[in-house]
Image: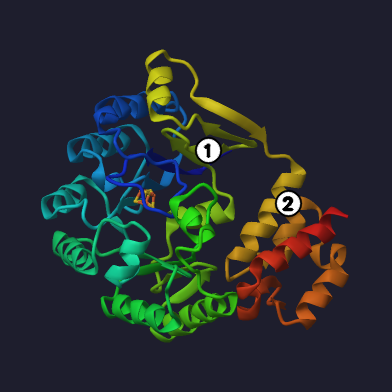
Amino acid sequence: MITELSLYLHLPFCKHKCYYCDFNSFSGKDELMPDYADALISEMQSFLPQSPLIKSVYFGGGTPSYFSTELLVHLIQFIKEHFFINAFTEVTIEANPGTVHFKDLIRFHEAGFNRLSLGLQATQDQLLQVIGRIHTWQDFLTSYKQARESGYTNIGVDLIFGLPGQTIEAWQDSLERVTALKPEHISAYGLQLEPRTKLAALVEHGSLKLPSEDDVCAMMQRTMDYLRDNGYEHYEISNFAKPGFHSIHNTGYWSGRNYLGFGAGASSTYHQDRWVNITDPGAYIQVQKNRISAVASLEVIDHTIAITEAVMLGLRMRKGIDLAQFQASFQIALADQAADELARLTKQELLRVQDGRLLLTDRGVLLSNYVIASLLAKLEE
Ligand code: SF4
């Protein structure tokens, strides 16, 4: 029986497409917003009879703060009225500087959003321009200050390292400027150069140059050292938080909590099923109007998939995998099944076992893809 659940609402509208972005997000489709909100309500209504406690609600995108404020308030009111949420439910909205105003922040807070995730990415205007962000550092500072004045006591800031032309010193400067503001949560992602993005084309044609792999590793190492020295717990490969402020929503994804995703391209995991909705917002609206399923693909999470995900996601968490619990869940003694590989990776100081948990070392974090892939390959033999 499912006793806890998370909800995700996807708002795929942006003012402008960032050059590195391959998310399911669109600019120039603003006229769809009212119908899209109706479609979200219609999709949520189909799940209403089965609402366990909702641990977290997350409005992501796209740029939710670019969506109509009135419609966002309407959506959160619907959730509060129809799902089982309580005072401890984490309710997050993503916002980007340049698309959010003081009165909107106040409105969101009054409506029930108790966590704000602000997309900054870098503190240097020149770098922001290179990746196609629409805001400046000053815009971010204004939004951040207004968010505090609106009453948010849980603010996350997103940063990206490994940007074209970014130096280790520039990254250090971003870390210092952001931590000086004391946000409760910082996400620091390494840039993924996604094919078919404008940024990938610019790098391919030689117009922009990415930092070397060594520099990117140094930036990650610097992130871990600096944020830990400044009171942030490194609780997932890319996520850092002040004590008590780990993201409840994202921790749910990493620890296998069931979640329902609503909206174009949203995915859900419920019992043994995982499904993904059609990605086009117009088509999504249409199927909801016609009361047809929005599901584009469905997979059953079998034993093999569940093991793979438990290893991948468990190792991403800095507390690692509880080996006894893993064995109880999957009838596999990880330490025996992959003994040679574990010994090899441990000898290379990439993994270690501590208090019955298997976890990545700091060095292992820098090479996490390699470590996780090596371990999974061994398990698949
Ligand atoms: S704001 Fe976010 S979702 Fe929108 S284009 Fe930029 S990175 Fe993508």
The residue at the point 73 percent across, 51 percent down is 307
Quadrant of the image containing the C terminus:
bottom right
* Residue for badge 1: 268
**In the rendered image, is residue 292 in sight?**
yes
Residue lying at 86% horizontally and 62% vertically, measured from the top left: 337
Mark pair 1, 2: CA separation: 18 Å
Q: Position of residue 309 (x, y in %)?
A: 67, 52
Residue drawn at point x = 49 percent, y = 78 percent: 219
Q: Earlier in the sequence, mark 1 or mark 2?
A: 1
SS for callout 2:
helix
Q: What percent of the width, then of the height, locates residue 347?
A: 79, 82
Marks 1,2: beta carbons within 8 A: no
Residue extending farthest left: 103
As drawn, is 247 to the left or to the right of 214? left
Percent coordinates x, y for residue 204 in the rendering: 54, 58
Per the rendering, the mark at residue 307 is 2
Mark 2: few/some/many CA within 10 Å (<14, 14-19, 20+): some
Residue 85, given in percent of the width and then of the height, sits at: 35, 43
At 29% from the left and 24% from the top, the residue drawn is 35
Type of amino acid under label 1: Ser
Q: Is residue 231 visible?
A: no
- Front residue of this view, candidates 22 and 350: 22
Does the numbered disc 1 mark a residue whose Cβ is under 8 Å from ligand 1? no
